[in-house]
Image (cartoon, helix red, strand yellow):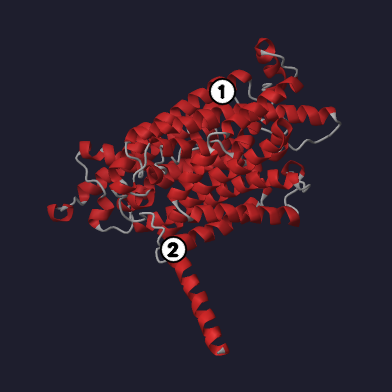
């Protein structure tokens, strides 16, 4: 009887385990084929997703960085408006139309034009950087959670490069929640976004308004004067690069360039009923990357002012600290959820990217692996400290292959060139795609590095005078990089297809 009971118990345990695995395997996300019509979503879903993803914990970081880099009030209000408008137009006019026509992830669209080897390289590197970005969101949320339990967050600005063990444990718990949500797929992400998106903008706004009196702002009459004197002063903090109007434009446009001009969000918009839903990005840009950045700048200035008045020599304006100052525990909750709502879709994309590089792995397993990498990067304080630089490099490096999708879709038929050439010829690697990708990033990096890194200063003595005198900024490189990438790719494709055209049999 004991044996029978033990056998029944073992069978029931195995059955429960198998059922869980089967349920996870059933979370199919159309990884390798077009999304079907019965799985499409409407306006509310994409408004909620963009609002929640881009009203994020990192807005507390990037808005703060603008203050530390010494922008003026005009730079912030006007520069961010221009940059975010360009970002919305890029999503709506470049990314969404292709997404609803093809309904494939970016990885499988790249495979058609660049071949499987470059796709695997792109996917593996893209997954790694997405894990790093998701890790920065976990870091943001952890600063809020740790503050409530009395655990200090690391201050990279004064050389604290490793968090405490207790802080790491909190980060692991926060990251585990995010990983589970990402495993559940697009439908659960959309539902979570709809729940938390409506109230987060109000917390940002309320916290900023509540902090204005501490800076001496009593109303609209003296807002602009005090804003230029105490918030966006036009003077960079020691050790920080001076930012201007064009830096604000570039950061607002470039920080998501791999998602719109780089076509990364065709993976998301493949679920959209209409291409016009690309304009839903405005809710994320102007509530998140405009209002929230401005609000977090106010909170940062108020926090630094309060700390300085209290005699603190080196204030550490973490997202948790500045949110607590402005909105109390409501601010803490907002930081935690804002980090989650951005990390969830970021990790979801990372899982899809890794699955391209590991095709025999189940999506949920790959996403959990990505979650582990995310938690590790969350415990590296330098990731948050240099987030603006990381975002800029991330955009410049991954944007070209997405740009090739745009050119292949719209321009090639008009030039009489064959679309999806690598797929139709059965190529493992498209050399035009390789030249365009690495050539674009290499040229733009060297033009920037020659004035920023001493190891590359020798280039100024070997370049033509007009290039040696050109002072490239990382945030202004987006448009030149896109133009260089598509020019190199198109010219190389003309040569390639002239020498080896696709036969009629191949095209069928």
Spot occupied by residue 416 in the image (x, y as percentages of width and height): 19, 40
Spot occupied by residue 73 in the image (x, y as percentages of width and height): 62, 19
Residue at (37, 34) in percent of width and height: 277
Q: Is residue 242 left or right of residue 474?
A: right
Of all residues shown, which one is farthest toward the top? Answer: 221
Q: How many marks?
A: 2
27 over 345 or under it: above or below: below
493 over 303 or under it: above or below: below
Q: Is residue 358 visible?
A: no
Of all residues shown, which one is farthest toward the right? Answer: 311
Spot occupied by residue 356 in the image (x, y as percentages of width and height): 40, 58
Q: Nearer the viewer, residue 406 or 289?
A: 289
Q: Which residue is mark 2?
A: 23
Q: Quadrant of the N terminus?
A: bottom right
Residue at (69, 21) in percent of width and height: 233
25 over 147 or under it: above or below: below
Task: Give SS at disc 2.
Answer: helix
Task: Give SS at disc 1.
Answer: helix
Q: Is residue 157 left or right of residue 97?
A: right
Residue 215 numbered tag: none
Spot occupied by residue 433 in the image (x, y as percentages of width and height): 35, 48
Q: Earlier in the sequence, mark 2 or mark 1?
A: 2
* Mark 1 surroundings: few (<14), some (14-19) or many (≥20) residues within 10 A: some
Of all residues shown, which one is farthest toward the front? Answer: 1
Q: Could you give the CA–CA distance between mark 2 and mark 1, rounded to whole angstroms?
A: 51 Å
Q: Is residue 253 left or right of residue 38?
A: right
Q: Which residue is mark 1?
A: 245
């Amino acid at each position: 009887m004991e044996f029978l009971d033990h056998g029944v118990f073992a069978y029931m345990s195995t059955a429960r385990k198998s059922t869980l695995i089967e349920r996870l395997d059933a979370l199919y996300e159309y990884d390798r084929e077009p999304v079907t019509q019965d799985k499409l979503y409407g306006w509310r879903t994409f408004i909620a997703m963009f609002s929640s993803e881009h009203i994020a914990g990192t807005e507390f970081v990037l808005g703060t960085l603008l203050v530390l880099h010494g922008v003026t009030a005009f730079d912030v209000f006007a520069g961010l408006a221009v940059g975010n408008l360009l970002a919305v137009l890029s999503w709506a006019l470049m990314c969404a139309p292709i997404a609803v026509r093809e309904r494939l992830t970016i990885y499988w669209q790249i495979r058609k034009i660049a071949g499987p080897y470059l796709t695997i390289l792109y996917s593996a590197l893209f997954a790694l950087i997405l894990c790093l970005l998701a890790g920065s969101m976990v870091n943001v949320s952890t600063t809020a959670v740790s503050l409530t339990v009395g655990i200090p967050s690391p201050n990279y600005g004064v050389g604290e490069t490793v968090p405490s063990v207790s802080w790491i444990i909190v980060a692991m718990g926060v990251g585990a929640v995010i990983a589970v949500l990402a495993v559940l797929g697009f439908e659960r992400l959309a539902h979570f976004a709809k729940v938390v998106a409506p109230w987060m903008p109000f917390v940002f706004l309320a916290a900023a308004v509540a902090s204005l009196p501490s800076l001496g702002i009593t109303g609209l009459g003296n807002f602009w004067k005090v804003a230029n004197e105490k918030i966006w002063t036009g003077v960079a903090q020691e050790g920080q690069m001076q930012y201007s109007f064009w830096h604000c434009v570039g950061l607002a446009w470039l920080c998501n360039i791999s998602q719109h001009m780089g076509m990364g969000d065709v993976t998301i918009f493949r679920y959209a009923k209409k291409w016009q839903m690309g304009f839903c990005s405005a809710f994320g840009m102007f509530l998140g990357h405009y209002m929230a950045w401005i609000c977090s700048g106010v909170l940062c200035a108020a926090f630094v002012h309060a700390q300085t008045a209290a005699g603190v020599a080196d204030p550490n304006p973490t997202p948790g600290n500045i949110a607590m100052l402005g909105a109390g525990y409501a601010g803490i909750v907002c930081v935690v959820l804002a980090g989650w709502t951005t990390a969830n879709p970021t990790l979801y994309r990372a899982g899809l990217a890794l699955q391209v590089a590991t095709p025999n792995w189940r999506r949920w397993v790959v996403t959990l692996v990505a979650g582990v990498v995310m938690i590790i990067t969350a415990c590296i304080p330098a990731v948050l400290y240099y987030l603006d630089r990381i975002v800029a490099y991330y955009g410049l490096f991954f944007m070209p292959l997405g740009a090739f999708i745009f050119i292949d879709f719209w321009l090639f038929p008009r030039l009489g060139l064959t679309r999806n050439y690598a797929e139709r010829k059965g190529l493992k690697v498209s050399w035009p795609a390789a030249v365009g990708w690495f050539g674009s990033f290499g040229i733009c990096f060297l033009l920037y590095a020659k004035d920023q890194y001493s190891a590359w200063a020798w280039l100024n003595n070997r370049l033509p005078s007009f290039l040696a005198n050109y002072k490239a900024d990382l945030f202004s490189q987006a448009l030149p990089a896109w133009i260089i990438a598509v020019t190199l790719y198109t010219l190389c494709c003309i040569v390639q297809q002239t020498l080896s055209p696709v036969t009629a049999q191949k095209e069928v």
